[in-house]
Image (cartoon, rainbow, N blue to C red):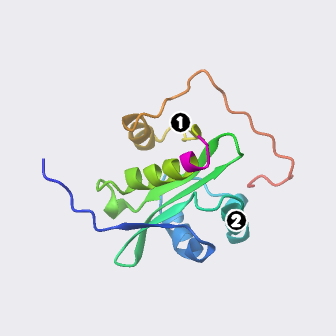
Amino acid sequence: SKELAISFHLYPMTPADYPEVMTLWQRSSGLTLREADSQTAIAAYLARNPGLSFVAREQGALLGAILVGTDGRRGYLQHLTVAEAARGRGMGKALLAAAIDALQKIGIGKTHLMVHADNDSAMAFYRHLGWEDRQAIRLFSFNASGHENC
């Protein structure tokens, strides 16, 4: 098999990346956006979780992003997205590896994520990279905000 030339670079995500990241998120199927993804909320999230989220750029263009945080005990992958035209080149794997490495450097060894039950391609991607599908665990949510889309 022929090695793919890696011509993209990873950078820590900053609030200045938000407009491009939001455009990427909006174009990505299988990703749900909520009020918690507002520019103000993401800037606060990045401030609380410095150096854990990354963007992938190629010739200046933002083609991938990963949003990751921690509660001090576990890591939480919120959004991992690669532009459709840039998929299959290792960008998602590189973004994920950078985030896991950054978490490990601050002592976080286990990371969780949520995937929509009908997002077969995302589930296949994570399984291929060794993530465990935890069938015995159910997700419960409580919304104290009174807003349906928070």
Q: x%, y% of residue 92?
A: 40, 53
Residue at x 56%, y 23% (from the top left corner): 135
Q: x%, y% of residue 61?
A: 40, 76
Local packing at callout 1 (Cα closer than 10 Å; few below 14, some 14-19, many 20+) is few
Residue at x 75%, y 39% (from the top left corner): 141
Q: Looking at the image, do the residues carrying marks 2 and 1 touch, with CB atoms under 8 Å apart?
A: no
In the rendered image, the quadrant that contains the C terminus is bottom right
* Callout count: 2
Q: Is residue 30 visible?
A: no
The kind of residue on which mark 2 rests is: Ala
Mark 1 element type: loop
Q: Is residue 2 left or right of residue 125?
A: left
Mark 2 element type: helix
Residue at x 66%, y 27% (from the top left corner): 138
Range of residues picked out in magenta: 104-108
Mark 1, residue position: 117
Q: x%, y% of residue 85?
A: 32, 63
Residue at x 87%, y 47% (from the top left corner): 144
Q: Is residue 89 visible?
A: yes
Mark 2, residue position: 47
Q: Is residue 105 magenta?
A: yes
Q: Main secondary structure of the magenta part?
A: loop
Q: Is residue 61 left or right of residue 52?
A: left
Whole-angstrom CA distance, mark 2 to mark 1, is 30 Å
Q: Is residue 85 left or right of residue 110?
A: left
